[in-house]
Image (cartoon, rainbow, N blue to C red):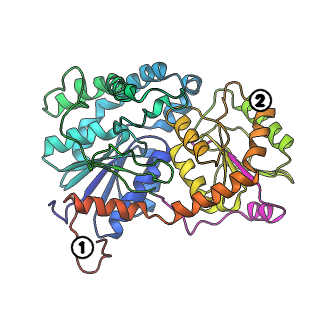
Amino acid sequence: MRDSTAPIAIFTIGTQGDIRPCVALGAGLRRAGHSVRIVTSDNFESMVRAAGLDFFPLTANFQSLLDSNREMTEQGLNVAAMARISRRFYSEWATHWARQGMAAAEGAGLLIGVANSTLLAKAVAEARGIPFVGAQLQPLTPSRVMPPLVLSGAGKLPQALNMPLYNVLRLLVWYVMKPAINDLVRPQLGLPRYPWYGPYFQSRQQRVLYGFSEAVVPRPIDWPDSAQITGYWFLDEPHWQPSQALRDFLEAGPKPIYVGFGSMVSAQAEQFTACVLDAIDRSGQRAVLATGWGGLSAKEGAQDERIFITQGAPHDWLFPRMAAAVHHGGAGTTAAAVRAGIPSVIVPFYGDQPFWARCLQREGVAPPALDRKSLSAEALASAIGSALQEPARRSAAALGERVRAEDGVDAALRCLQAWGFLPSVVDAGYRAVA
């Protein structure tokens, strides 16, 4: 059992959809009486501190990276190209990771490593002799019955290929992370390097929390007990207030659709935006456009009586007021749309986004994903029309009810208790989670 008074440090890097769930998990741990540190890039410091958590910096600013390398989006769904690109910038960032990680773990009693920060957090935990647990927002534990998520949409493959394909994926991930971890982090921490094939073939199963819903990703029957699906980790903003202009727009007519691509950027944002606006016009719908990090290019405010443009608004406030959501299929945006009980139209940019599109299509709450590079206004307008049909709306409402009945953060805390990382009963004065 860890020292219940020692801080818990959560390592996480990525875009907004990657960081928000980790801050939500940290906030839940804080409510349960634990001191929590979030170790991430400096562009999320205000979010971390607003949640009442301690912030520790980690060199890994995806916002700056994407903003200065917008052409990366053109390679987004090319797995080999993204692996080469990612290998380069991770090795650049990692020159600072050992020092930053050790500082963040000073005095900590538990480290949680999320997604691409997992091997860093695990190395720091090893160097300091601190317990470690993994966390993921996508299903990565190998399964004989569920193919790797990067092959989503590749057609039905024989189940016999699933485990060999997971092994290939493990080697690909290690190719990306090896210069950062084996050449920099582990030597700087005085730890032995991993063998050429990396750390992913160890017989001992690493314990991992999965921050998504079984209503969206059913648990594979062959997953070990060390892999637990908890439900989504939502970071809500209950005190957020919209501008009067946005409130007036929403009250001026029927529910609009949401169109936004979150943390995505585009090298051809103007052309992409023109296509989106044309599609909205063809669909006959009112719309709220969120420009986000730069996937769409437009000035804020009401463009006309049918379109309102904003940089963004909290999904927990906005999505229940929408009729449907057109988005990139990021894990966070997908979760928000599902919880709101609204259909989706997904235009993937990269990574896990085609996987989430397939999940929602399977549940009947989204039409097939649209190819961004060949996207036409006609195709997008048609997909919006399909998403607004009664079958999709009914399925989305039912799925939303299931997800809203879950408490993913509380379930995660219970898993940590069961594994011996947290006490089952917290000190008096704090909310009990057992």
Residue that mark 2 sits on: 376
At x 30% / y 40%, what residue is drawn?
118
Residue that mark 1 sits on: 426
Magenta part, dominant SS: loop
Picture coordinates of residue 237, whole percent (x, y) = 54, 64
Within 10 Å of disc 1 (Cα), the crowding (few <14, some 14-19, many 20+) is some
Badge 1 amino acid: Val
Within 10 Å of disc 2 (Cα), the crowding (few <14, some 14-19, many 20+) is some
At x 55% / y 35%, what residue is drawn?
354
Looking at the image, is mark 1 or mark 2 earlier in the sequence? Answer: 2
What is the secondary structure assignment of the residue under circle 1? loop
Q: Quadrant of residue 140?
A: top left
Badge 2 amino acid: Ser
Whole-number angstrom distance, CA of label 1 to CA of label 2: 55 Å
> Which quadrant is home to the C terminus?
bottom left
Picture coordinates of residue 53, whole percent (x, y) = 36, 60
Looking at the rendering, the stretch of residues picked out in magenta corresponds to 234-263
- Asked whether residue 257 is drawn in magenta, I would say yes
